[in-house]
Image (cartoon, rainbow, N blue to C red):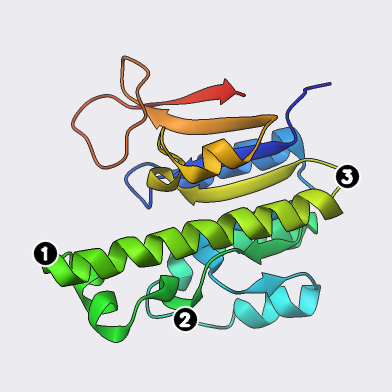
Amino acid sequence: MNSFFIIFFCNTHGFLNDFEKEKEIIEKYNPEVILAESLEEEVLDSKDKFKEILKKEKISNMTSMEEVKDLIKLCLEKNIPLIGIDFKNFGLDENLQRKVSKQEEPTAEEEEKLMKIVGERERRHIDLIKKYQEECKKKILVILGAWHLRDDSPLRDSFKDYKIIYPADKDGNMVLGPSNEEISWREEEK
């Protein structure tokens, strides 16, 4: 049996086919629960909740249904609870939502505010992962943007016995954004 309990999957937010890899991981490890940043605050732990959310066009102002629909359908089919581990709209006010969505350069003050929010989000991720780690007996799949699992991430230092699956360049370095280089999926255990 593998020694790791948590599987971290570094979502690329669309510059690779994330769902194809997510499906492969889910089928291989059959996690007890899936914790996902992209579900924000949604808790899908019953068939009714899954069916209800699939009627919506978006999760929030920051997440379209198109981004998460395949994952939601797969979890419904496999009867795996899918839990959001972030804040609604990722904790961003309307101004920051607009800036991030339009990929506009933030002011120095906005950048400072964004970094504070990122810290709050990462603390929330850690707290909720620990909560489910205590409750679950089987493996947990945690899906987060690759940037949240960078080398100096608080998430990496907060857990032991995990596997991380991430997009990598030819030298094995984690890729945090779109690249012209060839990218492949790598796995690492801690």
CA gap between label 2 and label 3 equals 34 Å
What's the amino acid at mark 3?
Lys
Instruction: Measuring from the top left, give residue 90's x and y in whole percent.
Output: 43, 70
Answer with left or right where residue 91 lies relative to residue 5.
left
Viewed as shown, does residue 117 lie left or right of 137? left
The residues bearing labels 3 and 1 have C-alpha atoms spaced at a distance of: 44 Å
Image quadrant holding the C terminus, namely top right
Instruction: State the image coordinates of residue 61 (x, y, percent, origin top left).
Output: 38, 80
Which quarter of the figure has residue 170?
A: top left
Q: Note whether residue 111 is visible.
A: yes
Q: Which mark is residue 137?
A: 3
Q: Position of residue 44 (x, y in %)?
A: 71, 71
Specify the farthest residue to the right: 137
Task: Give the class, few, some or many, for how many residues have Cα within 10 Å of label 3's Cα (few <14, many ≥20).
Answer: few
Question: Is 18 positioned to the left or the right of 105 in the image?
Answer: right
The type of residue carrying mark 2 is Glu
Q: Indicate which disc, 2 or 3, sits on the residue closer to the N terminus.
A: 2
Position above or below: 138 against 104: above
Q: Position of residue 59 (x, y in %)?
A: 50, 77
Instruction: Classify residue 74 by image quadrant.
Output: bottom right
Label 3 or label 1, whichever comes before in sequence order: 1
Q: Please report the residue visible at 11 percent of the width from the left and 69 percent of the height from the top.
A: 107
Q: Of helix, strand and loop, which one carries label 2?
A: loop
How far separated are the C-alphas under marks 2 and 1? 28 Å
Q: Nearer the viewer, residue 14 or 37?
A: 37
Kindly indicate whether the residue at mark 1 contacts the one at mark 3 (C-beta within 8 angstroms).
Answer: no
Please indicate, yes or no, whether residue 59 appears anywhere in the rendered image: no
Residue, disc 1: 105
Q: Tell me: 30 left or right of 185.
A: right
Q: Residue at x 55, y 67 (%)?
A: 39
Q: What's the residue at 62%, 36% (across, down)?
A: 24
Q: Residue at (32%, 45%) from the top-left corner?
A: 15
